[in-house]
Every structure is written in C-alpha cells, then in structure tokens.
Image (cartoon, helix red, strand yellow):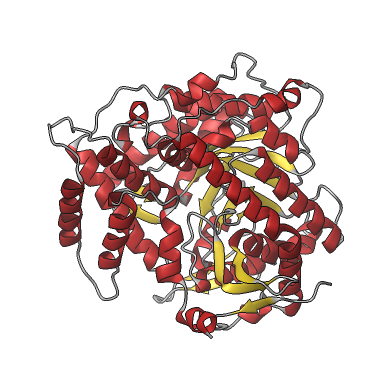
C-alpha cells in the first residue's frame, strides 16, 4: 500500500484512533496522490466558468456532448441492493443521537450528511465516521444527559453517505505529495475515503453496499473525476467494479445543463439524481448575481411551483428515467413542533402538498428532515407507487429539455421589508449555530442548513448591488442591512458561549462587501473551526 503521507494536526479524542489508522491514512494518501491534482484543475475550471458568467456568457446545452444526449442506447447501473425502494429518505447530521434517530425513523434511506447539515469541526468530522462505523455494525447506542437511552430498532434504512464537496478542505489533516509539497487534505477525499475504507466490505457482507450522495457538482468532468475515484477504490479494496453507487445532487445551475452527461460519466456507478432545491436556488443567485434581469424576490416566494423550478425538476425526472436512474425529490423546509400543534399541522400540510407534487411529477422518492414527517411523505408516494418500488418506467416524454426554461426567472413577487429582515435573521442565527458545531438548525419552524443560509446572504448582496426598492418603498443599501443586522443581534437572547458577534462579522463580510465569496463557509471554517493545534503546527 502507498506510504502514509497524511499528518494529523489535531488532538486525537477517545475513539479517533479506530478511524485514523495508519492503513486508512495510507489509503487517503493514495487517493490524494492520484486525484488531488485533477481536483485542483476542476476547481480552477470553476473559476473560469464564473468569470465567463460574470462577463455575460449564457449557459447552454453542450454541443460537444450532443451525441451522448441523443444516443438512446446507454443506461446507468441503477439501484444497488437496498436502494430499489427509496420513496422516503431522511437527511441529517451524523452525531450519535441523530444517527440513531435517523436509523429508527422508518425511512427507506438515511442520507448521512457530512456536508451541509454538519458543521465541519474536527470533532464532528471524525465522530461522524465513528458513529457510521458503529451504526453499520449495529453496535451503536447513546444515553443523554437526562438519562434517556437510545438504541437501534429491528429495521433500519439503507445508508447513503454524503461527503463534503470538491471545494472544501480538511485543515486538520495535511497531505505531502511525492515531491514534498504540503497542503490541506481534500474534505471530499477524507470523508469519502475514511468511510469506504472502513465500511465497504462490511456493508457488502450485510447485503447492501458503499453508497454515496455526491454534492455540488458543476459539470460532467467533475462527475468523471468521481467515477475514477470509485473505480480506483474498488480495485484497491478488492471489491467488484460497480459495487459503489452514487446519487448526484443536481444543485448547481451548471449541472442542470449537463444532467445526462453526468449520468453518462458515472454510468457504471450511478443510482440516480436528486433535486437539491436550496443549493440550486443559491447557485442561480450566485451565478447571475450581477445581472439586472436575474434579481429574485423574497425567499418565501421561491417555491417549487415557480416556472424555472418546475422546469428544473421535470427535466431532471426525464433525464433520470430515460437512463434507468432514480429521480429523488428535495427537502421541504417545514418541520413539526411537538410543543405547538398548530405549527405541526401546518408543517404536515405543507410537506404533504410538496410530496404529492413530486410523486405526481414522477419522482421515485423524496427527502424529509424530521422523523415525524416520514409517514406523511410515505403516504403521498404510496398513493402513487402502490406496491411498486419506484416509477422509473414513467419516462416523462412530454417534457422537452429547454435551456430557456431553466433560466427564465420572471416570476411574480417583490422584495419586502419583512424579506430583508428574515434573510438577515436566518443568516445570523444559522451561522451562529454553525460556529457552535451545529450544522442543521430549526429556525422559525423551518430546517435551515448551510444552503438556506447561503440563499439568505446572497439575496442580501444581490439586492444591495442592484439598488432594489422594497414593496414598502425602502431602498436596500449596505446601511439598511447593517442596521437590520445590529437589530437582529440585539434581539437575540444571549447565553454563555454564544457566537452571535462572530456570526454578525461573517454576515457583514459575505453580504455587505463588494466581493462575493463563493461560499460563506470557506472563510468561516478557516478562521473559526480550525483547532488551534493546527495553526501552531502550520507555523512550526
């Protein structure tokens, strides 16, 4: 095996040694030796594409890949064992309590989220791997501070793990390449590599397989890179080619123009695509943020029924079913509140409406973010699917791929004073939660994660940039948003260890400055979530 050239720059908590073994780190080293350079090339290509969009170039279906789209003969590998029926998937972070709750939720699949629902503290990254390791082997339990005990029930969902995207790094691990150059490890390769190394053989023995949700892809060449990672891993670990299965989140506007190409590149390993609605909205705002005709109204008006979102989801179902892939719907943000029956009734009604639309449109399954929503979502898909595991045979030939429809953002709606205040409050409170290590937060009876916080801050930036006037007649300026932020901080109940002041500083940097950071989490991670021993080691 490749010599280990990954340094651990942070303290090892109890149990970490079971994950960060020499053999596992050597495998991570091998992944970096083979793929770190290509990862950097893909990230550089993203920067080029952003410059093109900023300069007015329009997205289009690629003429050079027309042959792939027009060839009716190819299909993807499709569902692996345990993935044929995905009618309800629950998403959530991988802390120990949430792991057990997800595994006991009654969902068909658990999306074990090491990305947008996880704040990437050193503890969360490795503790999540420990919890996955134990859950797969059914050796996980948890006792709360109040003495409540959690353990697995008899029936558990298939696990599909989501690693971090290509753009994120893991600064607590340092990679030295064969030439002696040092750099932070790739968050993607660390999350993926530790999971597949420790669990692939065990998962196969238990009748399923190593399955992944792949986030933030922007084009088919990034998918090709993942496919090569999968093939290398299968060879290195001695498992059959095609055992690994991936479901790709279509959550960037660039990927929406290359859905069939992404399926094609991953065809030996692909189970399907997912409509990652919140990151998709963020991507649209980010990609066209400087264009006057692309300014969107309040987030509350950006529902799945507006024309450009309908076009995106219907074209996704068509692409998937044409190639034998599952189409998985997105997550409604509404969540129940067990202490407020009225809030719960509203959430159940909203979720039922959302899932009824998805099932009717041809999706094979959907996401929920709370165990109490599983039954509601399942009822809507049961009504359409019956005893069938999916509806991949529904081809949606009535849908015509349309570039114009994907970027026609003309919808009814205005920016309101309440919309400005809501975006400020959500961004502030979510980032404060994230800084304390909590990556999925219930805010105003909605489940917020990094993607929804990105929408909030990017809309504020865009409204300031274009001098939007609210429905009530106020000009959205830096001064106005800064005042709203001061008021939001003052309104928060303070507590020992809160991070509202730090969160406000981040909001100002990512929403009020002239430059637009591509992701708010990149700078915030480096400044606030990297443990001090790492900084000391780097300086040494």
In the picture, measured across the screen, residue 279 lies left or right of residue 492, that is: right
Q: Quadrant of the C terminus?
A: bottom right
Q: Quadrant of the N terminus?
A: bottom right
- Closest to the observer, 356 or 470: 470
Q: For the view shown, which residue lies furthest in the bottom direction?
A: 540
Rendered position, 234 above or below 359: below
Report which quarter residue 148 is drawn in: bottom left
Q: For the view shown, which residue lies furthest in the left direction?
A: 473
Report which quarter residue 399 is drawn in: top right
**Residue drawn at the location 25% of the way across and 66% of the way down:** 501
Rendered position, 11 above or below 51: below
Rendered position, 384 above or below 482: above
In the picture, measured across the screen, residue 70 lies left or right of residue 11, that is: right
Q: Decide if residue 362 is in sight here.
A: no
- Closest to the observer, 224 or 299: 224
Rendered position, 466 above or below 40: above
């Amino acid at each position: 095996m490749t010599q280990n050239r990954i340094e651990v720059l942070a303290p090892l908590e109890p149990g970490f040694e079971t994950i960060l073994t020499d053999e596992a780190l050597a495998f991570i080293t091998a992944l970096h030796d083979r793929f770190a350079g290509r990862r950097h090339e893909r990230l550089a290509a993203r920067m080029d594409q952003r410059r093109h969009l900023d300069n007015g170039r329009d997205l289009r279906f690629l003429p050079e890949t027309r042959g792939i789209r027009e060839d009716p003969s190819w299909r993807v590998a499709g569902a692996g064992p345990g993935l044929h029926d995905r009618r309800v998937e629950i998403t959530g972070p991988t802390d120990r309590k949430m792991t057990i709750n997800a595994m006991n939720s009654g969902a068909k699949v658990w999306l074990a989220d090491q990305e947008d629902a996880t704040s990437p503290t050193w503890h969360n990254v490795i503790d999540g791997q420990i919890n996955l390791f134990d859950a797969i082997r059914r050796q996980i339990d948890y006792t709360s501070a109040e003495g409540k005990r959690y353990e697995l029930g008899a029936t558990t969902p298939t696990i599909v793990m989501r690693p971090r995207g290509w753009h994120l790094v893991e600064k607590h691990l340092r990679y030295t390449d064969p030439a002696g150059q040092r750099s932070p490890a790739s968050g993607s390769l660390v999350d993926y590599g530790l999971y597949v190394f420790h669990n692939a053989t065990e998962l196969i023995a238990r009748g399923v397989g190593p399955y992944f949700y792949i986030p933030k892809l922007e084009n088919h060449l990034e998918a090709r890179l993942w496919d090569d990672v999968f093939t290398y891993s299968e060879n290195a670990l001695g498992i059959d080619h095609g055992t690994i299965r991936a479901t790709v989140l279509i959550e960037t506007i660039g990927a929406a123009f290359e859905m069939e190409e992404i399926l094609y590149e991953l065809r030996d390993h692909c189970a399907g695509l997912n409509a990652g609605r919140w990151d998709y909205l963020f991507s649209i705002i980010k990609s066209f943020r400087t264009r006057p005709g692309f300014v969107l109204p309040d987030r509350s008006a950006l529902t799945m029924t507006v024309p450009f979102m309908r076009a995106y989801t219907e074209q996704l179902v068509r692409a998937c079913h044409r190639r034998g892939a599952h189409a998985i719907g997105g997550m409604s943000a509404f969540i129940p509140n067990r202490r407020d029956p009225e809030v719960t009734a509203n959430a159940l009604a909203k979720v039922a409406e959302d899932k009824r639309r998805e099932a009717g449109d041809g999706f094979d399954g959907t996401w929920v973010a709370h165990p109490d929503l599983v039954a509601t979502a399942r009822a809507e898909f049961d009504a359409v699917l019956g005893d069938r595991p999916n509806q991949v045979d529904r081809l949606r030939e009535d849908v015509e791929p349309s570039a114009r429809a994907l970027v026609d953002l003309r919808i009814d709606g205005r920016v309101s004073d309440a919309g400005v205040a809501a975006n400020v409050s959500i961004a502030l409170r979510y980032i404060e939660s994230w800084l304390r290590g909590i990556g999925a937060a219930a805010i105003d009876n909605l489940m917020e994660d990094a993607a929804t916080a990105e929408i909030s801050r990017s809309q504020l930036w865009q409204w300031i940039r274009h001098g939007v006037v609210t429905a009530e007649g106020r000009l959205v300026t830096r001064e106005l948003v800064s005042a709203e932020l001061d008021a939001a901080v003052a309104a928060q109940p303070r507590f020992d260890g809160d991070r509202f002041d730090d969160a406000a500083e981040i909001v100002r940097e990512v929403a009020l400055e002239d430059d637009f950071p591509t992701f708010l989490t990149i700078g915030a991670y480096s400044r606030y979530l990297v443990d001090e021993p790492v900084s000391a080691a780097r300086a040494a």
